[in-house]
Structures are given as structure tokens and as C-alpha cells.
Image: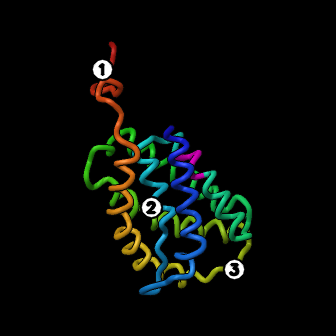
Amino acid sequence: MDAAKAAALLFLAVLVQVSVLGAYTPLGGTADLLLVVLLGVALLRGAVFGAVAGFGTGLLVDTANLGTLGFTSLLLTVAGFWIGRYGETTARDRAHAPYVSVGVVTVLYAFGALVLRFVLGDSVPAHAVVTGLPAGVLLNLILTWPAYALLRRLFPPADAGDRVREVRLLA
């Protein structure tokens, strides 16, 4: 059931991102609702779930934008996996975790896209990424609060009996 909810929510986020938010640049930066929603889902459901969701949504974005197929998929797969792993290991129950995740991954996503475009031979002015980055981080952090509140309701944490509380090493 989680997969169906996540697929519908991420599809809606792709539609909003591609049709509305992609062209809207307040303060010189762009809000990335898709990235915020993907990171919230990955934080709540884990690394594998986040990686699969990132690949699927990235493929949808690449198809909708008629861009290089696999470009966004690669970046979102890595982002979904690492934030899912962060949620699995340390941060799932902490209040600051979604904000830290979104802030860090927004910066890494921008620089990762810049490096990947360079490797592919595309010409991208680095100053455009750097000048729009502070506004993009701020807008994504503003989007994090309502998006993560909705995601916590849609994807409640697993029962306490299902999770391991302590790990003991056997000698």
C-alpha cells in the first residue's frame, strides 16, 4: 500500500514541478517540490524504497522535459538512497532530520548536476547554479515543513515491535 501511495504522491509532485514550479523563480532560485517529497518518502521508508522512487520519478521528469534520459534518474536515485540510509541509521525520529536532509541534498544535487553536465559535455555556466543556490535552498526548506507533515500522516512509522532498538555484538 505504501508503494501505491508514494507513486501517486510522487507523480503529482512531478506534475507540479514540471508544469508550475520549474518556470517560477522567486529570488533567483527554483523550489524543487519533487526533491522535497522524494527525500521525505525516503527518510520515512528507507534506502531501497527511496532509490526506486528516485529512479522512477527521475525517469518521469526526464521524459516530461525531453532531457537527457537518465540524467535526473541518476541524481534522484542517489539522493533517495542516501537519505533513506540516513533515516534507517540515525535520523528517522529526529525533528531536524528532514530539514538537514533537504538542505544538504539540495546543495549536493545542484553540484552533482553541474558535474554530470560537465562529464556529458554540456555547456552550463557555473555562476547560474551558484547564484540561484541560496534561494533554492531557502525555498526547499520552506516547502519541507508542510510536505513532511503530510508525509508523516501518509506514511506513519512502523510499529515499535518491528524495529530493532539495540544492536549487540557477539563476541
Label 3 amino acid? Ser
Please identify the residue farthest to the top as the structure is shown. Answer: 171
| Rendered residue at 61%/83% (across/down) | 125
User: Compared to 27, does 148 lie above or below?
Assistant: above
Residue span colored magenta: 50-54
Residue at 68% from the left image edge and 64% from the top image edge: 62
Provide residue 4's location: percent of width, then percent of height. Answer: 55, 43
Q: CA distance from mark 3 to mark 1?
A: 52 Å
Q: Residue at x 32, y 62 (%)?
A: 145
| Residue at numbered disc 1 | 168
State which tag comes first along the sequence, 1 or 2. Answer: 2
Q: Secondary structure at mark 2?
A: helix
- Read off the residue under disc 3: 123
Left or right: where does residue 86 sit relative to residue 130? left
> Would residue 171 be found to the left or right of residue 74 on screen?
left
Measured along the vertical axis of the image, is residue 84 above or below residue 170? below
Closer to the chain start, of discs 3 and 2, is: 2
Q: Which residue is mark 2?
A: 36
Q: Position of residue 18 (x, y in %)?
A: 60, 71
- Residue 6, how many percent across, how many down? 51, 48
Residue 63 lies in quadrant: bottom right
